[in-house]
Amino acid sequence: MSWPQNSLQAHYPSEKHVLSDKLLGAGGFVAVGVIGLIAGGVYLQNVVPLGPVGTVYSAGTIPLINLAVGLEVGSGFLLMLSEFLAQTLRIRARRGR
């Protein structure tokens, strides 16, 4: 089966956007840590007030950390996937498929 190169590449974000998301995730993790360091004296200190038990708000800064890490890991995975796709398309173009 022959895949047109441009149609497959059009569905994946550019490397620049993926890297910016990865940096945003890493920066978010560092920002949460530094805010804890400034406010509480310890890196990643909980500075968000705790909510009622059993809700997301009861976890303090943990959901913020999880969001930052999830963004970084997800964008890293997407970057690897797009690189593998680009490599596959280059190999198929070289073979003439």
Image (cartoon, grey):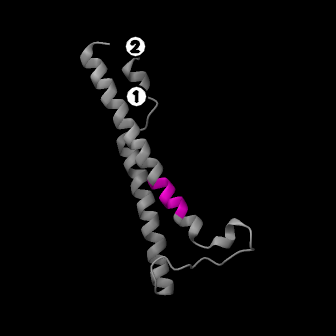
- Asked if 81 appears above or below 68 in the picture, the reply is above
Identified at 44% across, 34% down, the residue is 12
Kind of residue at disc 1 = Gln
The quarter in which the C terminus is drawn is top left
Q: Position of residue 94 (x, y in %)?
A: 24, 18
Instruction: Specify the segment rendered in magenta.
Output: 66-72
Q: Which residue is mark 2?
A: 2
Mark 2, Cα crowd under 10 Å, few <14 / some 14-19 / many 20+, is few
The question of residue 91 being in magenta is answered with: no
- Asked if 77 appears above or below 2 in the picture, the reply is below
Query: Magenta span: helix, strand or loop, mainly?
Result: helix
- Asked if 5 appears above or below 44 in the picture, the reply is above
Q: Is residue 47 left or right of residue 83?
A: right
Whichever of callouts 1 and 2 sits on the residue coming sooner in the sequence is 2
Q: Which residue is mark 1?
A: 9
Q: Tell which of 49 and 80 is nearer to you.
A: 80
Q: Secondary structure at mark 1?
A: helix
**Pointer 1 with pointer 2, Cβ within 8 A:** no
Q: Secondary structure at mark 2?
A: loop
Q: Position of residue 62 (x, y in %)?
A: 57, 69
Q: Tell which of 58 and 10 is nearer to you.
A: 58
Pair 1/2: label in front: 2
Identified at 51% across, 80% down, the residue is 45
How far separated are the C-alphas under marks 1 and 2? 14 Å
